[in-house]
Image (cartoon, rainbow, N blue to C red):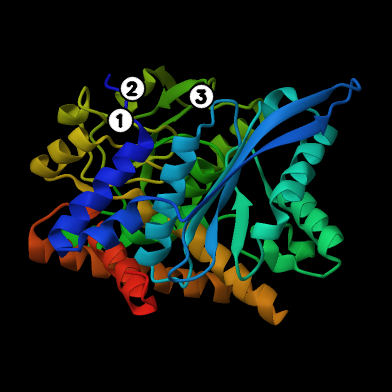
Amino acid sequence: MQSYNSFEVAQSQIKAAAELLNLDRATLNLLLWPQREFKFTLPVKMDNGDTNIFHGYRIQHNFARGPAKGGIRFHPDETIDSIRALASWMTWKAAVVDLPLGGGKGGVVCDPRKMSVRELENTARAYVRAIWQHIGIDRDVPAPDVYTNPQTMAWMMDEYETITNQHQPGVMSNKPLSLGGIRGRRGATARGGVVVVQEACRTFGVDPTGAYAIQGFGAIGQRIAMFHQELLGGGKLIAVSDSSGAIYSKAGINPKELVSHKLRTGSVVGFPEAEAMDPQALLELDVAVLYPSALENAINIGNAKRISARIICELANGPTTPQADKILFEKGVHVIPDILANAGGVTGSYLELVQNRDSFYWSESLVDERLDKTMTRAYQTVVSGAQARKIPMRMSAMLVAVARVAEACKLRGWV
């Protein structure tokens, strides 16, 4: 399988959109690169008394429409280019759903699976000590990402407030409820994905109660299974995979029972009402909806021609390679691209930010209602552009997003 540099892919998407929009060279060059990049070393005291030096990053891609927004991931394989790409996609993600935010992303090169809770806390606090002058509710608002969670954000928020001697819960998003988090935020990414699938089914006449499959059954995948049943009025979950393997049942899998099994055993493997299957074969099943929610480049030139799903909803970032994207479009597969499909997360974070600013908190039903309206409106805008221009949904989404950010840059007089 061909390997892709994610930042080069992100830049190629920007160039393609800029060409169709007839953007001038200066605007294109501005959008191709992050406006700010921070790289720092983090001395972290470990439980055995040693001090480990971890490398950390924070990339702030664009501020034209508002403060940077994006997660912080703890991962041993993190690279500057992967974070640049993710920061860029956050800019377009916020713009495509029309939020007054820019894009950012951060990371620490470490293996959290080999670290204690105290070591993780020390790392989180060290990260904030390195970057605190460049984040804030009006500058850059981080969130959890891979191997980080609301507890990580709680530690980071506390460190920031300790340094600044101010109460600023809005400096981080997706926090615990008791520290300024909001109801419904944990399920916002999955809920937003299912909302746009619902719109896609209506637009293209696909039966929303048909078969569906989920690649990746972490927190988001588990919630997808539940929301698909709840919002689409049913549906038959026939296959699921995680890092340990995959399972299949022609008769259908009960999502609640599978979630319980996963939480109890740590894997979908061994679920009694399904049989084992090849994880790669899951992607090629004949389903109404396929949710790639795990790996980059999962759908590639090697398997794209065998994809049989009518709708693909990209809950993962970058699950489809550029070559595969072209093949799927020619096959008539409706791909809801990641910058739209998983934008429920940044939408939920924005709603949390608004509530933190006002110190007034809404009910979960009101949060869900506002999330649903935002995602529905964004999908309708993107699909209308795709149909009018006869272009893939990814390109249509990029055209919407890049045009909005480019306009903001020009109005500010940057280019």
Q: Which residue is mark 2?
A: 280
Categorize mark 1 by other alpha carbons within 10 Å: few (<14), some (14-19), many (20+).
many
Look at the numbered discs 1 and 2 and tell me whether their residues touch, using CB distance below 8 Å.
yes
Q: CA distance from mark 1 to mark 2?
A: 6 Å
**Residue at the image point whose x is 80% and y is 32% from the top:** 44
Amino acid on which the number 1 mark rests in the picture: Leu
**Quarter where residue 160 is shown:** bottom right
Judge whether 253 appears above or below 22 on screen: above
Mark sitting earlier along the chain (3/2): 3
- Across and down, in percent, residue 238 comes to 37, 34
Q: CA distance from mark 3 to mark 2?
A: 12 Å
Mark sitting earlier along the chain (1/3): 3
Look at the numbered discs 3 and 2 and tell me whether their residues touch, using CB distance below 8 Å.
no
Q: CA distance from mark 1 to mark 3?
A: 14 Å
Categorize mark 3 by other alpha carbons within 10 Å: few (<14), some (14-19), many (20+).
some
| Residue in the foreground of this view, choosing between 351 and 247 | 351
Asked if residue 140 can be seen in this view, the reply is yes
Amino acid on which the number 3 mark rests in the picture: Ser
- Across and down, in percent, residue 325 comes to 20, 40
Quarter that holds the N terminus: top left
Judge whether 6 appears above or below 385 on screen: above
Q: Which residue is mark 3?
A: 243
**Count of numbered circles in the view:** 3
- Across and down, in percent, residue 242 comes to 49, 28
- Secondary structure at numbered mark 1: loop
Amino acid on which the number 2 mark rests in the picture: Gln
